[in-house]
């Protein structure tokens, strides 16, 4: 009597080498996540040169994630959930919770088993961004990102959480903030989650007076002007990485913090010196809604625009 054949139920799962694909064969990360999670993101913001940030809430997951074009970095604002990742016969188990990160490197594939609901913020980071940041920071060429499953990293978690907090609001202000944070996140990933950890060189002085004046003039221009990090750095003849460092050395503030302070002063002047409605003030400063403007104003002053106007108007 012949013995029954015993099959390994994981033998057909992709191995790391089998999962690797050319860039042309890889799916966009947002599209693959939407397919696997079976839902749409609650909020999402993208920048062609930086990638995208999306906030999802999804249910149980038992599926193979196909190779994606970008690196996917995940953090978990709330909740507690078991994560299981299988690639071939390799198994990684972690817990989705605050203060940890999960990383799916571009081109990798694995089966994921998650028993219940998850609240997750995802960063879709192009390899070109990692290479640009490594070059601008005068580091060696980046090694491959490491796979992580619920890996403790409160620094990356806080940075990505901050970026997700500005998925709505003033388009120019929030876009500038996300661009800065994406570069910081790329720097952090190179240092802590790369096969060849990078060492970033220290800052080397501030901007010249003429260059600083030009940057401030652009930041002070109307809300339709291009105040992206790329435009500011190009005007200064610097990389984005070095421009941010030099601007902060000169002013004590990052470009985003300087612009946020400037917009707050504009808002206060309009609330105090004009009869413009709060809706009009919000629109003039580039906020998508009055609610977004009021939330940003209150975060900086501790008061709503209406309450502030009553006291000082």
Image (cartoon, grey):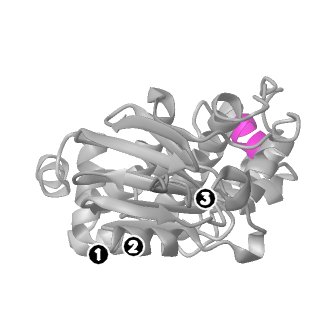
- The secondary structure making up most of the magenta span is helix
The residue drawn where x is 83% and y is 26% is: 204
Q: Quadrant of the C terminus?
A: bottom left
Q: Quadrant of the N terminus?
A: bottom left
Mark 1 or mark 3: whose residue is earlier in sequence: 3
Residue numbers of the magenta segment: 241-247
> Closer to the observer: label 3 or label 2?
3
Mark number, residue 93? none
Q: Is residue 252 above or below residue 129?
A: above
| Dot 2 crowding, Cα within 10 Å, few <14, some 14–19, many 20+ | some
How many angstroms separate mark 3 from mark 2 (CA)? 53 Å
Mark number, residue 14? 3
Q: Are marks 1 and 3 in contact (CB under 8 Å)?
A: no
Instruction: Judge left or right: residue 243 versus residue 85.
Output: right
Residue at disc 2, secondary structure: helix
The residue drawn where x is 24% and y is 69% is: 290
Residue at disc 3, secondary structure: loop
Q: Kindly give the residue lying farthest to the front in the view shown.
A: 1
| Dot 1 crowding, Cα within 10 Å, few <14, some 14–19, many 20+ | some
Q: Is residue 44 above or below residue 4?
A: below
Seen from the viewer's position, the closer of residues 281 and 10 is 10
Say whether residue 243 is magenta.
yes
The residue drawn where x is 80% and y is 51% is: 132
Mark number, residue 280? 1
> How far from the left and from the top, in percent, is residue 158?
43, 35
Q: Are marks 1 and 2 in contact (CB under 8 Å)?
A: yes
Which quadrant would residue 217 be assigned to in this image? bottom right
How many angstroms separate mark 1 from mark 3 (CA)? 55 Å
> How far from the left and from the top, in percent, is residue 263?
43, 55
The residue drawn where x is 76% and y is 76% is: 24
The residue that disc 2 covers is 284
């Amino acid at each position: 009597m012949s013995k029954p054949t015993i099959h390994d139920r994981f033998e057909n799962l992709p191995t790391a080498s089998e999962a690797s694909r050319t860039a042309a064969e890889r799916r966009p990360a947002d599209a693959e996540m939407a397919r696997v999670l079976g839902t749409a993101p609650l909020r999402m913001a993208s920048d062609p040169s930086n990638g995208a940030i999306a906030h999802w809430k999804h249910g149980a997951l038992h599926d193979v994630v196909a190779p994606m074009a970008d690196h996917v970095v995940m953090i978990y604002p709330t909740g507690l959930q078991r994560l299981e990742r299988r690639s071939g016969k390799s198994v990684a188990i972690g817990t989705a919770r605050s203060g940890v990160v999960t990383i799916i490197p571009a081109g990798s594939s694995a089966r994921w088993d998650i028993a219940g609901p998850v609240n997750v913020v995802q960063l879709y980071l192009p390899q070109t961004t990692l290479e640009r940041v490594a070059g601008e920071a005068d580091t060696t060429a980046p090694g491959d990102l490491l796979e992580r499953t619920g890996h403790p990293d409160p620094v990356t978690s806080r940075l990505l959480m901050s970026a997700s907090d500005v998925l709505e609001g003033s388009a120019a202000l929030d876009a500038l903030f996300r661009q800065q944070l994406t570069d910081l996140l790329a720097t952090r990933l190179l240092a802590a989650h790369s096969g060849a950890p990078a060492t970033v060189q220290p800052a080397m002085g501030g901007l010249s007076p003429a260059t600083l004046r030009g940057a401030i003039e652009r930041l002070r221009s109307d809300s339709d002007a291009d105040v992206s990090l790329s435009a500011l750095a190009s005007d200064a003849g610097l990389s984005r990485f070095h421009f941010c460092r030099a601007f902060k050395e000169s002013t004590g503030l990052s470009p985003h913090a300087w612009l946020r302070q400037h917009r707050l002063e504009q808002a206060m002047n309009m609330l105090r010196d004009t009869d413009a409605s709060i809706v009009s003030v919000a629109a003039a400063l580039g906020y998508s809604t009055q609610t977004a403007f009021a939330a940003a104003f209150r975060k900086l002053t501790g008061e709503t625009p209406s309450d502030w106007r009553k006291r000082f108007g």
